[in-house]
Amino acid sequence: MSGKHALVTGGTSGIGMMMARGLLQAGARVVISSRSAGKCAEAQRLLSEFGDVRAIPADLSGHDECRRLADLVEDGRGRLDILVNNAGAMWREPLETFPDQAWDEVLDLNLKAPFWLVQALLPALRRAGTVDDPARVVNIGSIAAIHVAEAPNYSYASSKAGLHQLTRVLARELGPQHVTVNAVAPGPFPSQMMATTLETMGDRIAAKAPLRRLGRDDDMAGIAVFLASRAAAYVTGTVIAVDGGIATTATGT
């Protein structure tokens, strides 16, 4: 992917950093973002050994910040080859006390922000895409939108299910404009969002997976490279579970 230009939101840790690292190792120039300026600086330092990376702090729960980030990431040619919408939030709380705030904060970041960024960056994506090598949008969904998780994560699961369907809707509309849109539905990977869950039940989750393990950095780096490379030029509108088979083949509780 030498010469390609990518944006990975939420790219300072967890799945976003795994994907950013994979794209860098494949030769792309990558911009990462997150809300924390400190995390941006540290992630840029860590990822710089793999390639050309730049970090931009941005709170993507707001429409104006999505527009600002879009304006900053377009390269000198006004093009963007790869957009990875990974920034997200989760809220776990029992049904009886689940607050309004848990819907607003989670849906703004998990569902609205990916739409706002595609909207703002569409001219740059159109300029980058061709019939043989379309521009790529990769939305990070979740297996919580494919099966029902044990945790009470009502707004998170709903937002990711919405993102999966938004992926299909955008794929149909943007395909003729030489932009593919796909989603990745990660299973359990080590990340800040999953830290508590994996600490308390990581062994049990791994034992339920047909592949009998949790996700690793290279698993997520690999799917990012596949979807952004020539190998996936004829793939759009898909939701790919990267979960060791948990959501689609595992049985029992």
Image (tube, rainbow, N blue to C red):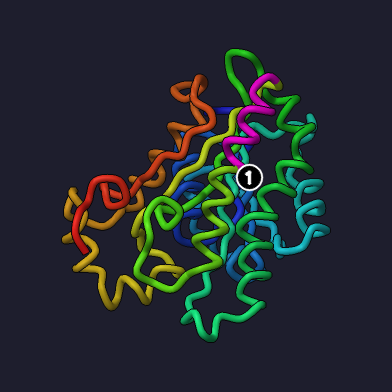
Residue furthest out toward the bottom: 97
Q: Position of residue 94 (x, y in %)?
A: 46, 81
Residue shown at 29% from the left, 76% from the top:
199
Predominant secondary structure, magenta span: helix
Above or below for 250 versus 38:
above
Determine the residue located farthest toward the top in the rendered image. Answer: 132
Q: Is residue 44 visible?
A: no
Q: Residues within 10 Å of mark 1 (few under 14, many from 20)?
A: many
Location of residue 187 (image quadrant): bottom left
Expressed as whole percent of the image width and height from the top left, the position of residue 195 reads: 38, 72
Residue 12 colored in magenta in the image? no
Q: How many labels sit on residues?
A: 1
The residue labelled by disc 1 is 7
Residue 173 on the magenta segment: yes
- Residue at image point 21% right, 54% down: 209
In the picture shown, does residue 27 fall above or below 93? above
In the rendered structure, the answer to whether residue 238 lies left or right of residue 101 reads left
| Secondary structure beneath label 1 | strand
The magenta-colored residue range is 166-176
Q: For this rendering, which residue is in front, 191 or 54? A: 191
Give whichever of 32, 9 is nearer the camera.
Answer: 9
Q: Position of residue 242 (x, y in %)?
A: 35, 45
| Amino acid type at image mark 1 | Leu
Of 220 and 107, which appears nearest the observer?
107
Q: Is residue 90 toward the left or the right of residue 249 in the image?
A: right
Q: Residue at x 48, y 34 (%)?
A: 238
In the rendering, at what x and y percent does residue 152 appear? 44, 73
Residue beneath the point at 76% across and 42% down? 119
Q: Nearer the viewer, residue 22 or 212?
A: 212
Any part of residue 12 in sight: yes
Q: Quadrant of the C terminus?
A: bottom left
Specify the quadrant of the image occupied by residue 181. top right
